[in-house]
Amino acid sequence: MASVLPFKAIRPAKDKVHLVASRSIDGYNRAELNDKLATNPFTFLHVINPDFVDGKKTKPGSKERLTKIKNRFKYFIEEKILKRDKKPAYYIYKQIKNNNEYIGIIACTSIDDYMNGVIKIHEQTITQREEKLKEYLEICEFNAEPVLFCYPNNLTIDQIISEVAHTNPNYDFTTTDKINHTLWVINDTKTVEIINRQFDTIPSIYIADGHHRSASSALLGNIRRKTKKDFTGNEAFNYYLGIFFSESQLKIYDYNRIVKDLNHLSATELIEKLKEKFYVKSILTDLFKPTAKHEFSMYLNNKWYSLIAKQNTFNNLDVVESLDSFILTEHILSPIFGIHDLKTDKRIDFIPGIKGPEALKKIVDDHKAAIAFGLFPVTMDHLKWIADTNNIMPPKSTWVEPKMRSGLIIYSFGED
């Protein structure tokens, strides 16, 4: 059964929360990052980028850099920019983005659940990245961005969340990207026990986003278990930070592809090759998205096309081969464009579906790519089918919302 546990979070002072919480560092270009660091002394980006304050450059991922991150984190606590809660709590978090509302519970989960399969995965991790994140955790000893989990809808948990959401929140702020963030701290013994017991009845939870963070936490935990003389299993390093959404609260978007060139083919030659496996139809509209599974959009030479896979191109009884991301690679990207490894080939890039078909159109119109392909979103049922059968999705098959802010709720597993 799933271990979803309350904990004593470290979180921003109420008057500074809107200044502290930041997007993931990957969400900023260099100019934006420098501007945030120069104009906001409270942003959590100063913890993640500690070189900005003293101007002394360190190598990313080096022991020197990671030590500076940990020291900067401690400084934020000493300055009371961040404070530790005195009682274990669950944290109800709501995000409103583009008129979509998401609400879930921030809590800790066990590395044992990850290792024994209670936590289900659908993505293969890369050993080198696991090791890099493990080294980060080993020195810094905190999670600042929760892994995104989903669980089967639970009426009791839903009722608690609904009741809490009608009370005064601990945080309520809107960031400059027009996203509203609201958070409630739930630390009364009765409610905490009810939530704990309800999660204890759930046989499996699913990683929606954060496979490498989960794997690296388990990796570090296992190392510490072997070196700790009086290991009990209750040490803080046995757990890591997550945000848990019921299945109905998550939104899975398509994850689309752009290709830099046509692999020496003319547009006419390309379309003729596509007709062998797809029904190809020109679409006379400014923007176009696939309307059903096994339909793809294609934007080429200022024109949209609908590509519908013919029956012999997929096997609906096979959990992986029935995925549109697999069909696209198997019948278009690999045989026609010569793109066989989506992780390493520099001729292909990926565009989150949340940006809409206009993003695909603009990239091609701006000559940053020769062609774009749009996919129909993977369903939650298909994601669970993959995970429950111990299969792995092709790279970049899903884009899941919501995305969390760094530094809003932090789990520290170092010594108090």
Image (cartoon, helix red, strand yellow):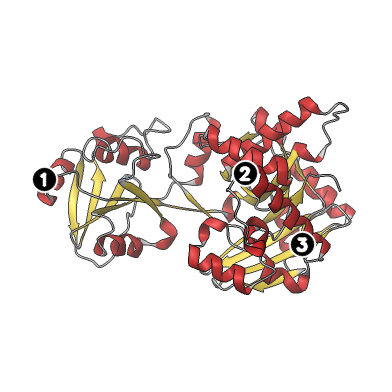
- Picture disc at residue 62: 2
Which residue is at a point 49% across and 35% down the rendered structure image? 386
Q: Nearer the viewer, mark 3 or mark 2?
A: 2
Quarter holding the N terminus is top right
Residue 91, given in percent of the width and then of the height, sits at 75, 57
Mark 2 to mark 1: distance in Å?
Answer: 50 Å
Q: Residue at x 37, y 42 (%)?
A: 325
Q: Are marks 1 and 3 in contact (CB under 8 Å)?
A: no
**Toward which corner of the image does residue 217 lie, by quadrant?**
top right
Asked which secondary structure carries label 3, the reply is: helix
- Foreground mark, 1 or 3? 3
Instruction: Identify the amino acid type marked 3.
Output: Phe
Residue in the image at 32% along x and 58% along y: 289
Note whether 394 is above or below 307 in the view shown: above
Residue 24 position in % (x across, y down): 57, 57
Q: Secondary structure at mark 2?
A: loop
> Quadrant of the rendered structure where residue 128 is?
top right
Residue for badge 1: 269
Labels 3 and 2: the sequence-earlier one = 2
Q: In the rendered structure, which amino acid carries the disc numbered 2?
A: Ser
Residue 394, position as x, y percentages in the image: 42, 37
- Please report whichever mark, 2 or 1, sits nearer to the chain's N-terminal start: 2
Please provide percent x and percent y for residue 292. 34, 50
**Residue that badge 3 annotates:** 76
